[in-house]
Amino acid sequence: MKTETVGNGLLKKIYGKRSDWSHKGNYGRLLIIAGSKRHTGSAVFNAVSAARSGCDLVTVAAPERAANVAASFSPSLMTEPLKGDYINETHIETLLELAKENDAIVIGCGIGGREETRNAVIEVIRKTEKPIVVDADAIRLVGTLKEERKKLFIGKKAVLTPHKDEFLALCGKKVNDDEKSRIDAVRKEAEKMNCTILLKGHVDVVSDGKKTALNRTGNAFMTKGGFGDTLAGICGSLLAQKINPFDSACASAYINGKAGEITSKERKLGVMAEDIFECIPKVIDNI
């Protein structure tokens, strides 16, 4: 099966000329479900990256402290503060109602692994019909379903974005740094789980079980916390703009990596994930 390398040709296909009569909402409404009392930055990384990559409207649903941080970071972000320090079962109805108002969802960044959070996350994924990006802690929580996880995404448009430790938690399979073995593992698991998987690494591997692509953008300075969250936000933005899951995963990996390359040329070891906010439009504009 042929494996392609992601290039900016994909971005040219995705980012076409906008109609002069475009209006608010034409280019996507995205719901971010993220954050906790301790991890207040995750939702910001998700949401601002989504807006910078073209999504019209972004709503953050997060525990109160994280939602307040997001609201104070940018007036462009809408927020839905959820009572308490962590996402739990009492929030399920609110989250599902918010999902109905949006075109896509990003779930999992900074939410933690508590049992009450697990139950809420699984229920939201199970009941929503909207395209969804599952990242970070939500990937580990899905992994606790064991064999049942293979049924969770049937009929859904889903992208899962694990790094190698999250891939192990999700699938029970350890991957090494060998490119071929990574390709084989991602392709097999994507087919089993009826979803697109983006395995992050020095070379990102993307597969939906049928098509497979490699992304080679990014560099070793992008080890700071938050760079995975920015990728998930970009991917959610593209899903909200009606781009299919495989292309959304490929393009988000490319954009995130390129933006990281641009900002780390200047900042090198001092680079932080929020530094790429201004660089995301530069990558897109460069096509």
Image (cartoon, grey):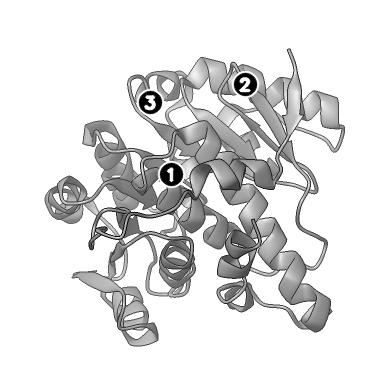
Q: Is residue 11 left or right of residue 173?
A: left
Determine the residue located farthest toward the right in the rendered image. Answer: 178
Image location of residue 83, percent across then percent down: 19, 70
Determine the image quadrant of residue 173. Answer: top right
Secondary structure type for disc 2: loop
Count the marks: 3
In this picture, is 121 found above or below 64? above
Q: Is residue 105 left or right of residue 7?
A: left
Q: How many residues crowd around disc 1 within 10 Å: few (fewer than 14), some, or many (20 or more)?
A: many
Secondary structure type for disc 3: loop
The residue pinned by badge 2 equals 211
Hey, what amino acid is under mark 3? Phe
Query: Viewer-nearest of labels 1 and 2?
Result: 2
Which residue is painted at 62% across and 28% down in the image? 172
The numbered dot on residue 153 is 3
Determine the image quadrant of residue 87. Answer: bottom left
Which residue is painted at 59% across and 21% down in the image? 189
Quadrant of the snapshot with the N terminus: top right
Hey, what amino acid is under mark 2? Lys
Q: Earlier in the sequence, mark 3 or mark 2?
A: 3
Image location of residue 41, percent across then percent down: 47, 74
The numbered dot on residue 133 is 1
Determine the residue located farthest toward the front in the rendered image. Answer: 20
Q: Calculate the distance from the C-alpha at mark 3 to the C-alpha at mark 2.
A: 18 Å
Q: Is residue 247 left or right of residue 165?
A: left
Query: Viewer-nearest of labels 3 and 2?
Result: 2
Q: How many residues crowd around disc 3 within 10 Å: few (fewer than 14), some, or many (20 or more)?
A: some
Secondary structure type for disc 1: strand
Judge by depth and name the residue closer to the eye, 228 or 10.
10
Quadrant of the snapshot with the C terminus: bottom right
Q: Earlier in the sequence, mark 1 or mark 3?
A: 1
Image location of residue 25, percent across then percent down: 24, 57
